[in-house]
Image (tube, helix red, strand yellow):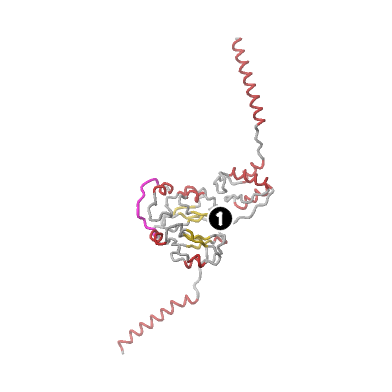
Amino acid sequence: MNFMLIAVLVLGAIALVAALVLFLVSKKFAVEEDPRLGQVQEVLPGANCGGCGFPGCSGLASALVKGADGGSIDGLFCPVGGEQVMGRVADLLGMAVAASEPRVAVVRCNGSCEHRPRIAEYDGLRTCAAMHSAGAGETGCGYGCLGCGDCVAACNFDAIHMNPETGLPEVDEDKCTACGACAKACPRHIIELRKKGPKGRRVYVLCVNKDKGAVAKKACEVACIGCGKCEKECKFDAITITDNLSYIDFNKCRLCTKCVDVCPTGAIIKVNFPVRKPRPAEESAPKQETVAAVNVKETVKEEPQA
C-alpha cells in the first residue's frame, strides 16, 4: 500500500514539474501573431493557386502585412480576387494599392494537327512532362504543344480545355484568373500571361520555335521564321527578334495590327478585333473582273460569225 502511494506521489510530482516547465517555455518562446494576418487571410479567396508568387494565400497575407508595416504593398497582387479583393485588403491595412491591368493566359502555339504533321508515335505515360523528357514528341517541332493536357489538369477554375479537332489547349478568358498554374505546368513554356487588353483585344506571336526559318517552317507551316518583317513594320519598337523568334512586348504594343498583315506565315494573331469591312475599291474589283470575263466570252462568240 505504501509502495503504491509513493509511486502515485512521485508521478504526480513529475507531472507537476513537467507542466510548470512547459508553461514557462511557452511563455518565453511564444510567438505573437499579428491579428491583421488572420483578417487579411479571410478576405483572400483561399484558392492557394500560387499565382501571386507565394506558396498560398497565407504566404500572400503575411507578405501584405509585412508590406503594410514597411509602408507599401505595391507589387503584391492576388490574380484570383482581382482589384475588388485587393481593394478590401488595402482598406483593411490602411494602404493604397496600385491599379493593375487584368491579364489572361494565352497559348503561344498554332501547330494544330493540320499545320504540324505527326511523324512519330509516343507509347508511354500520357503527360506533357513525360513526353517532353522522352524527346521531341510526336511531331518535328521540339518547341510546340505536346497535347497531353497537363495545363488542363493544373487549372483549378475550369478555364482551359483541349480542342479535340486541333489537339491544342484553348483558354476561356471569362473564367481565366491569370493564376499562372497552367503556365507552370507546361514543360515547354508555351503558355504566357499577357495583358487582357482594351475590350479583350490582344496581338501576339503564336509560336515559340527558335529554330532557323527553314527548319521551323518544315516542322510547322505556320511557325515564326524570324524574317523580321514584323519588326520593321512596327513603329512603336514593340517587336524584337531573338534566337530566330519574334516577340511582341504587350507593354509597348499599340494594337495597330500591321504586323499581322505582313507576317508571311500567319504566326501573329489578333484576338477580339472587329471584322474589317472591305473597302469600296475591294468590293468593286470582283465586279470588274466579271465584266471583263463577259466581254471575253462575247468576243469569242463573235469570231466564228466573222
Q: Main secondary structure of the magenta part?
A: loop
The C terminus - image quarter: bottom left
SS under mark 1? strand
Tell me the amino acid under the disc marked 1. Answer: Arg
Residue at the extreme bottom: 306
On screen, residue 306 versus residue 88, left or right, reads left
Q: Residue 27, relative to residue 129: is it above or below? A: above
The residue labelled by disc 1 is 103
Which residue is at the front of the view, 288 or 103? 103
Which residue is at the front of the view, 191 or 165? 191
Residues drawn in magenta = 114-125
Q: Position of residue 151 (x, y in %)?
A: 47, 50
Q: Position of residue 180 (x, y in %)?
A: 53, 50
Residue that appears at 50% across and 63% down: 270
Asked if residue 163 shows in the view, the reply is no
The N terminus - image quarter: top right
Residue at the extreme top: 1
Q: Position of residue 45 (x, y in %)?
A: 59, 46
Q: Position of residue 78 (x, y in %)?
A: 59, 49
Which residue is at the front of the view, 96 or 142? 142
